[in-house]
Amino acid sequence: MSPHGRGPHAATHMRATAMTVEESRTAFAAPQAILRRSGFAAAAPLFAADLAAAADAEEAEGVVASHGRRLWTEAVRQSDGVADDRFLYWARLTLSARLREWRPAFSVDEQRRAALADRLERASRGHDDLVFPPDDKLLRVVVAGFDPFGLDTDVRRSNPSGAAALTLHGSRLEIGGRSAALRTAIFPTRWRDLTAGMVEQALGPHYSPGPGAVAADAVITVSQGRPGRFDLPRYSAGMRGAAPDNEGVSAPGPVPPPRVEPALDPLPEWTASSLRRGAVLQHAEGRFPVHDNTEVTEVPAEGGEPVTHAGGPTPGARVRAGGGGDYVSNEVAYRNTLLRDATGREIPAGHVLTPVLELGSADPEALTSPDFERDRADIVEQLRAIVQAALEG
């Protein structure tokens, strides 16, 4: 990834009609080949045609929502066992680019256009589908993954957490004689969406449900971590590092405060996982080792360079990074567990880092391989076991 961003506020104030760095990658050969392989290649022209037929802004919003939900539904329904998250990722970006190019006969100001783009994001990421059946005996479990990242290094990349979200959505687990229903979603690898409150908008209702709704029994975020291992980061940091996101934007500094109530004031430097890590370590068997990760990175109280060590935060030191680092996924984990603490919910909530999923081929035309497919399937299946153990413990 390029180390040069455009500043922490560049994306927040980006013109809604300007194609993003992320959208521009859809023109590359590999994304185009992935779209042809996915069966989603026709989604963008169909979307553009329906947008062009919209008579007013309200009708356009309906088009955006329905096409976004259709993308999510079709991605979840992939019939070959374990979903390929790249299909949804690149298809969404082609729709997003068409929306930016749209020039209707009626007036749509920049604010309304940005709202339509946000509606497409939420609908196509499963945020509309985080709904559980009305059954008091049911355990309600939310699992959230992420988009691929590091695409400037290899545009063919997948993110196993996104593949897991698509594969596990709508599935059930048997937990101590009760049935657990899994509902999943995917978050972008972009700072601007976190600043705008996407995490709180998607996960907040599962901590503070409205009238007639029921809160979740567990909320677990998942992202890609280190090669060859799962990690259970115990601590998430309220700090952003300097690494650029999928739009090339860097936004180093403290995590911006959530725009919701209730909220903690001041924000804590750290939040802690409440996943039942002991049970996961003991029972979540699979091909990959699972590590209880207590690492933190902090500036010692006496000053100097940041130090990474196990054992959690130390008094007087200043936060720099958690066990899951200081990238977008650390912030989502932080915001999730902050919601838990602000609402006083004593439920399993925390983060899981999957092994890195490598394509293993330098051939730019190679989009998959038997090892890639096997590794993705093994990661998703072991993550299912981790979620089960975290609920049973």
Image (spheres, grey):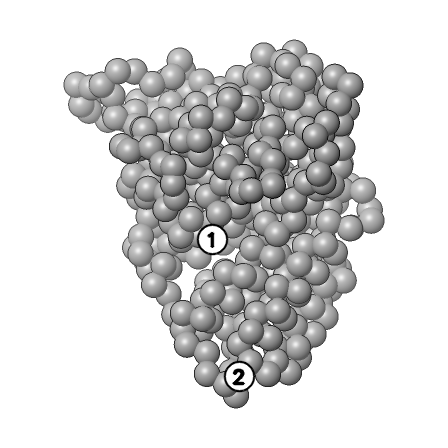
The amino acid type found where label 2 is placed reads Pro
The amino acid type found where label 1 is placed reads Asn
Q: Residue at x 75, y 23 (%)?
A: 178
Task: Identify the residue position indicated by label 1 in the image.
Answer: 246
The image shows residue 190 at horizontal and vertical percentages of 45, 51
Q: Which mark is residue 104?
A: 2
Q: Residue at x 59, y 49 (%)?
A: 127
Determine if residue 268 is in view: yes
The image shows residue 387 at horizontal and vertical percentages of 65, 26
Q: Tell me which corner region of the image, top left, top right, bottom left or bottom right, holds residue 226.
A: top right
Work out whether 219 lies above or below 192. Answer: above
Q: Is residue 211 left or right of residue 11?
A: right
The image shows residue 299 at horizontal and vertical percentages of 25, 25
Q: Is residue 153 left or right of residue 91?
A: left
Q: Residue at x 65, y 11 (%)?
A: 282
Answer whether labels 1 and 2 touch (C-beta < 8 Å).
no
Of discs 1 and 2, which sits in the foreground?
A: 2
Mark 1 crowd level (few <14, some 14–19, many ≥20, 10 Å Cα): many
Work out whether 382 lies above or below 22. Answer: above
Q: Quick one: quadrant of the C terminus?
A: top right
The image shows residue 379 at horizontal and vertical percentages of 68, 32
**Nearest to N terminus: mark 1 or mark 2:** 2
In the displayed orientation, state which residue is furthest to the bottom: 105
The CA distance from mark 1 to mark 2 is: 29 Å
198 or 321: which is nearer to us?
198
Determine if residue 245 is in view: no
Circle 1 sits in a helix, a strand or a loop, which is it? loop
